[in-house]
Image (cartoon, coloured by chain):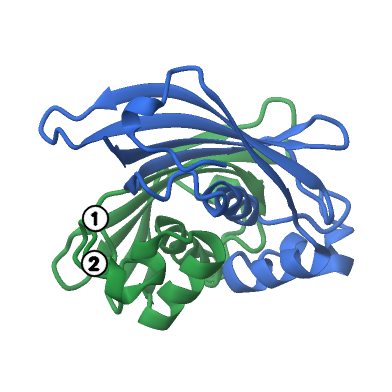
Chain colours: A green, B blue
């Protein structure tokens, strides 16, 4: 993926693809113990009694992994100044070894009035399970990019 | 902190306190390399040239650490069924060794119509830097709790 050169090179409705992420059982347990110690993220046996019927990834884990998939492409490495906010929706549980495809669609482009060297972009990123097409996560990210 | 016994024991406007989190330089670099490889989270020297003037924590890191501070108290361990969504705002950069106080305020309580054993709660969690009272993060979390 070629790095984006400027905020001005994005267009509303533009679609972006960022490859796939897979959360292994070990990664799910590790993340759960570290950041989200709820039994359905940390204990495979106990998780069988949960409403999910088994171990699932922390929603924060899915969020971090999809974000990492975006950043590792280098697409934003020349332009990113930093994030303002993120509205995350967890739409379905993520199980070990699910393959999640990460895509994005540019929603809004707002040039800064006070700082002519930057603009705000709102992009809706989506994580879709490859096996069945189920959307598992949506993330509407608002961030500053250089012009 | 005594674990919450039921969704019905929460009240709108109720204030919650969850102690403090501190993100060390090492933790910031480790998280940045793993989940958010932008230079102002991964390279102390390069970060000095960024708009922040130095290394700052990934917003995802602040989010995960504040969430972990909430969960480690065990307050939700009897009632939590899982999260629906989270609206995060990063209001100020977090620097190494900042002490962040984590509090919450219950915003909405919506008993489920279809499932009488649960309800949806929306709580606004806030991370405030102890040194100067600067709010660094807001997280409006929507989650299901047992009744």
Q: Quadrant of the N terminus of chain B?
A: top right
Look at the picture and state if A92 lies above or below B86: below
Q: Which residue is mark 2?
A: A129
Crowding at label 2, few (<14), some or many (≥20) Cα neighbours within 10 Å? Answer: many
Above or below: residue B2 compared with residue B27:
above
Q: Quadrant of the C terminus of chain B?
A: top left
- Subunit of label 1: A
Where residue B70 sits: x, y (%)? Answer: 56, 46
In the displayed structure, does residue A128 sit left or right of residue B76? Answer: left
Could you tell me which secondary element the residue under label 2 belongs to?
A: strand
Instruction: In this rendered view, identify the residue nearer to me: B130 or B118.
Output: B118
Separation of marks 2 and 1 at Cα, in angstroms? 10 Å
Task: Tell me the residue at 40%/30% (across/down).
Answer: B122
Determine crowd level at label 1: few under 14, some 14-19, many 20+ residues with C-alpha closer than 10 A.
some
Q: Earlier in the sequence, mark 2 or mark 1?
A: 1
Q: Nearer the viewer, residue A71 or A145?
A: A71
* Whether marks 2 and 1 lie on the same chain: yes
Residue marked by disc 1:
A92
Q: Which-is-in-front pick, marks 2 and 1?
A: 1
Do the residues under discs 2 and 1 have CB atoms within 8 angstroms? yes
In this view, B61 is above or below B113: below
């Amino acid at each position: 993926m070629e790095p984006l050169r400027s905020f001005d090179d994005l267009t509303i409705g533009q679609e972006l693809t960022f490859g796939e992420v897979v959360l292994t059982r070990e990664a799910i347990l590790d993340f759960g113990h570290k950041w989200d110690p709820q039994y359905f993220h940390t204990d495979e046996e106990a998780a069988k009694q949960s409403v999910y019927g088994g171990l699932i990834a922390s929603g924060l884990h899915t969020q971090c992994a999809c974000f990492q998939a975006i950043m590792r492409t280098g697409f934003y490495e020349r332009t990113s100044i930093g994030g303002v906010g993120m509205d995350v929706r967890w739409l379905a549980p993520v199980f070990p070894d699910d393959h999640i495809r990460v895509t994005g669609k540019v929603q809004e482009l707002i040039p800064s009035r006070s700082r002519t060297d930057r603009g705000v972009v709102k992009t809706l990123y989506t994580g879709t399970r490859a096996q069945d097409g189920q959307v598992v996560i949506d993330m509407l990210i608002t961030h500053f990019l250089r012009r």
